Structures are given as structure tokens and as C-alpha cells.
Amino acid sequence: MGLWLGNSPLILASQSSARKMLLANAGLEFEAVTADIDERGIQTTSKLSNPREIALLLAREKARAVSANRQGSYVIGADQTLALGERFFNKPAGRVQAMAQLRDLAGNSHELNSAVAVAHDGKIVFENVSVARMTMRPMTEAELSAYLDAAGDAVTRSVGAYQLEGLGVHLFERIEGDHFTILGLPLLPLLAFLRRERLVAV
């Protein structure tokens, strides 16, 4: 018997392998559906500059977009932003941009803002933003190049050009924050909400 007690399937509005892994490891059966939204367009139109607010806005929009076509289902939207001081980072477009981001991040501390929103019948019924502080070790050009050679195209799939659950772990000297926030889904607050709504069996 599965842990999910909802009358309709749980939906994850994301194809992120890390988010899918986190939900699956928590014993939740779910469907993963791509949220077809223009993230950069929404961000620009909103005129928001606070990375936490942007992450939450995009999480809400993803959840709402999928919820509109999934009557009765609880839909999880999630987004993550990276801020180095006042600077805001997006996923790098390729190796050159990944190298530029890593040069800026090396030897400094940055914040990952991970937002989750749950929509039900088009209405947001839960939201949360969790923050992790990441300190990257100082690195030479040769070390950065070696990392990029080893990581390959994976660097374009995450903001900051790293996946901590993979080769990106070699870049860091200190991490403050929970594992789930770093991987892009504040799982503990999400599970607490699902328990309050009696949607999970434990």
C-alpha cells in the first residue's frame, strides 16, 4: 500500500530528476508533468528583484499552470534561485557562461532560495521558501576547467552550474541548510502540509 491518500494522483509540475528523486524516496507515488510557462517572461513582467519572491512566484505559476488541467489533484510547483549578494543567477546557457558563473562564485558564499507551492483546482493552498547558504572554495582556472570537463552538459541544468548531489560537491567547503532545500524542494515543510491535510499515511 502506498503512502498517498488523495483521491486524485499527486502531481509534480517539474521534470527535475532531483525533485522526482526526493518525492520517490519519501515513498510518494506521483506523476511528473512539465509546466509550460515562460519563466523569464514572468520574471521580467513581475518586476520583482528579490530572489526569494521570484522563486515563490515561479513555483506558484508552475503549480497553477498544471492544476488548471488536473481537476481534483494536488499539484506541486517548485523553483530555485541563486543570489550572490545583490546579483541574481540563472541557469548557464553553455560552458562559457558556466565558467563565468563559477569564477564569480569561487571563494564566496551565496544563497539558494528554494520555493514550493501546492495548487488544488487552480488555487494555491500552500507555499514555502527555504534558504541554504553555500560557500564555494577558492579555485584556480585549471581546477574550474577540470570540473567543467568532468561535469559536461550537466552544468547547464542547474543554476550556479553545479549539482551538489553529483560532481558539484567538489566545489564546496561549507554548507548551511538542509539537503532538500539545496536540491530544490523544501521537502519537510511540504510533507508537514500533506500530513495536516491527511493526504499521506504517515
Image (tube, rainbow, N blue to C red):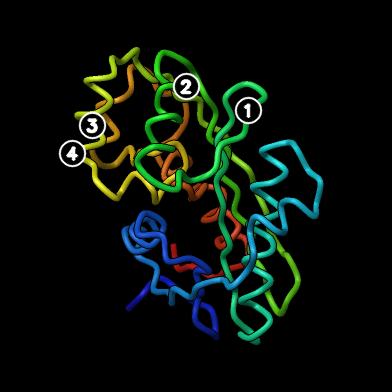
The residue under the point 22% across, 20% down is 142
The residue under the point 58% across, 62% down is 77
Q: Quadrant of residue 202?
A: bottom left
Tell me which numbered mark, 3 or 1, is placed earlier along the sequence. 1
Q: On screen, 149 above or below 172? A: below
The residue under the point 64% across, 64% down is 38
Q: On screen, 9 above or below 99? A: below
Q: On screen, 9 above or below 84? A: below
Relative to residue 152, is residue 10 drawn left or right? right
Circle 4 SS class: helix
Residue at image mark 2? 104
Tell me which numbered mark, 1 or 4, is placed earlier along the sequence. 1
Q: Position of residue 10 (x, y in %)?
A: 50, 75
Q: Amino acid at mark 4?
A: Ala
Circle 3 SS class: helix
The residue lying toward the viewer, choosing from 159 and 133, is 159
Q: Position of residue 198 (x, y in %)?
A: 57, 68
User: Whole-Å distance between the Cαs marked 2 and 1?
Assistant: 10 Å
Residue at image mark 1? 87
Q: Amino acid at mark 2?
A: Asp
Q: Quadrant of residue 36?
A: bottom right
Residue 183: which disc? none
Could you tell me if the residues under marks 4 and 3 are in contact, i.e. CB atoms within 8 Å?
A: yes
Residue 147: which disc? 3
Q: Residues within 10 Å of mark 2 (few under 14, many from 20)?
A: few
Q: Amino acid at mark 1?
A: Arg
Q: Locate the N terminus and report the quarter of the image it occupies.
A: bottom left
User: Whole-Å distance between the Cαs marked 4 and 3?
Assistant: 5 Å
Q: Amino acid at mark 3?
A: Tyr
Residue at image mark 4? 150
Circle 1 SS class: strand
Could you tell me if the residues under marks 2 and 1 are in contact, i.e. CB atoms within 8 Å?
A: yes
